[in-house]
Image (cartoon, rainbow, N blue to C red):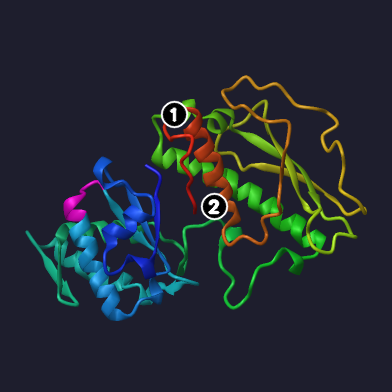
Amino acid sequence: MIPVWVDAGKAVPDLLDAVTRAGGEPASGLGRIVIDDLDRLSPEQVAQLLYEARLLLAAHPTARILATCRPGIELGRAVVHEVEAMMEHVRTSVRYTHQVAGYTYDSADIRWLHSQLAGVIDEVLRRPYGEPDQEIPRRGRMWQGYSPLLTLRITRQILRDALIGYRQLVELNFPSLAPALGLYSALPVSAEGMVVMPEDDTDGSHSGLIHTLRPKAAGRRNDPPEVDLDLWTEPGFGPTSPFPGGPVDSQTNFHRPYYVDRELSTGSSRPATELAYEWLVRDLKAVGWLGANVQLSV
């Protein structure tokens, strides 16, 4: 199932309603639910959200709830040590319960939380986005704020992390469907193209990214993606034929267009994540898993 993203401010007072509005389908089962920007809530709202989350999990056992904060929480403040102490009680008790803010958590809750935190190796808990999508505190992001060379570097990183994110989304959520998904069946691929930022383009109307994805002749799916982008800054509307070699026939299910012409992504809040989901949604529609009119936002 595709994870459902819910803004923390909309998750209270009715979490199930917020999940439904964000695209979740309780009638057909819920999967991962990501509650974004948890630190904007007051302690009272967090306590209410925890209560709502327990009710939702009791009614929908297949659901899994994750939460993110910005720009990060020190692990010492993320109750890692508290959880480890509680795990000692769990290991030595037949049944252990722990109360926080009036709510009771049993051994299964503590084991699950401990297993989630065990995968964290950094000193900071950050949003589960690619590196280009990590927020920079107190700093806005607009394409006009970047030089052409910096835009080129960031765009390379966006494409690289989007390809990694797409593969991880498929392998985590659709492992049995993976061989039928177009882009996944073509992995590993290399991204080739051009960042177009004409020097006389003062409003961004002629700037953009032209790229294509080419299946590689050899390699493994989890190999680091290769991204080869050039930079075009000459006046005018950009090159008329950015890929003189033309398209390369693919022996996979992946229907790859000659090239894709899109706006620069440096003004988006989560460009790599959005692009990964864009590829995934296109593939799911192609195999009929999603309806043609379904629109998802990250």
The answer to which image quadrant residue 67 occupies is bottom left
Q: Which residue is mark 2?
A: 273
Residue 203, compared with residue 139, is above or below; it is above
The residue that appears at 71% across and 44% down in the rendered structure is 227
The residue mark sitting in front, 2 or 1, is 1
90 sits left or right of 1 in the view: left
Residue 159: percent from the left, percent from the top? 65, 48
Residue 19: percent from the left, percent from the top? 33, 56
Q: Earlier in the sequence, mark 2 or mark 1?
A: 2
The residue that appears at 76% across and 55% down in the rendered structure is 152
161 sits left or right of 206 in the view: left
Q: Amino acid at mark 1?
A: Gly
Tag shown at residue 238: none
The residue that appears at 66% across and 62% down in the rendered structure is 267
Q: Residues within 10 Å of mark 2 (few under 14, many from 20)?
A: many
90 sits left or right of 237 in the view: left
Residue 60 in magenta stretch: yes
The magenta-colored residue range is 57-62
The extreme front residue here reads: 293
Depth order, front residue of 219/21: 21
Residue 232: percent from the left, percent from the top? 86, 50
Depth order, front residue of 240/249: 240
Q: Which residue is mark 1?
A: 288
**What quarter of the picture does the N terminus occupy?**
top left
